[in-house]
Amino acid sequence: QSSSDDCVVTKVTGEHMRRKSNDDVLWFKLADITLNCIPQNLSYHFKNLDHLSFHRTGLTKLTKDDFQEYGSQLKKLNFYDNQIEVIPADLFEYTRNLEEINFGGNIITHLERGAFQNLTNLKKLTLNHNSCELGHYTESANADNHADVLTLISLLENCTDVEELKWD
């Protein structure tokens, strides 16, 4: 259940596996449901969440405040196949221990320089099927280890010759 604006989770119900509780929940996933915002207060109900996943939710905008409640415990973010257009430079300010990020299948046209700068634990980055055409990265702008993540970020930050991609 959520508040009237659907942004604050007020109650969760459901069944757990035998001898499990909300404290055992590590992964929260919403798919094929329309969202106007990232649900807040999830960490109150699920204290050990380290993975958030939102597939085909229609999300268009993300801010650093969407993830503040998770802080350093958040390890994985998955926003596959939404309508996200902008990755702000400060998006990961509160979640610097992220290891995996997936923004594949969105409509990202604005990636602010330095957005991934302080994510020293980032080992997997997926940005396939977005607007920046990167030669051999066109269909699969993915990196599966830290060195490849740094290379992909460098390619993205130097993709200024693509007209549809705007940079700060």
Image: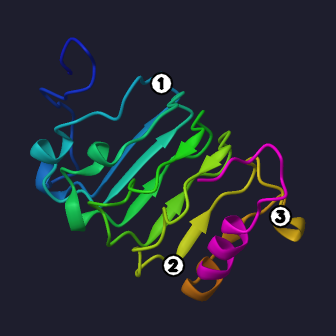
Q: Which residue is mark 2?
A: 123
97 sits to left or right of 82: left
Which colour style is shown?
rainbow
Q: CA distance from mark 2 to mark 1?
A: 29 Å
For the N terminus, which image quadrant?
Answer: top left
On residue 33, which mark appears?
1
Residue 46 screen position, x and y as percent: 16, 49
N-terminal-most mark, 3 or 2: 2
How many C-alpha atoms fall within 10 Å of the one at disc 1: few (<14), some, or many (≥20)? few
- In this rendered view, identify the residue nearer to me: 100 or 31: 100
**Which amino acid, mark 1?**
Ile
Question: Is 128 rendered above or below residue 86?
Answer: below
Residue in the image at 37% along x and 43% along y: 63
Magenta span of residues: 150-168
**Which amino acid, mark 2?**
Lys
Q: CA distance from mark 3 to mark 2?
A: 20 Å
Q: Are marks 3 and 1 in contact (CB under 8 Å)?
A: no
N-terminal-most mark, 2 or 1: 1
Residue in the image at 50% along x and 31% along y: 59
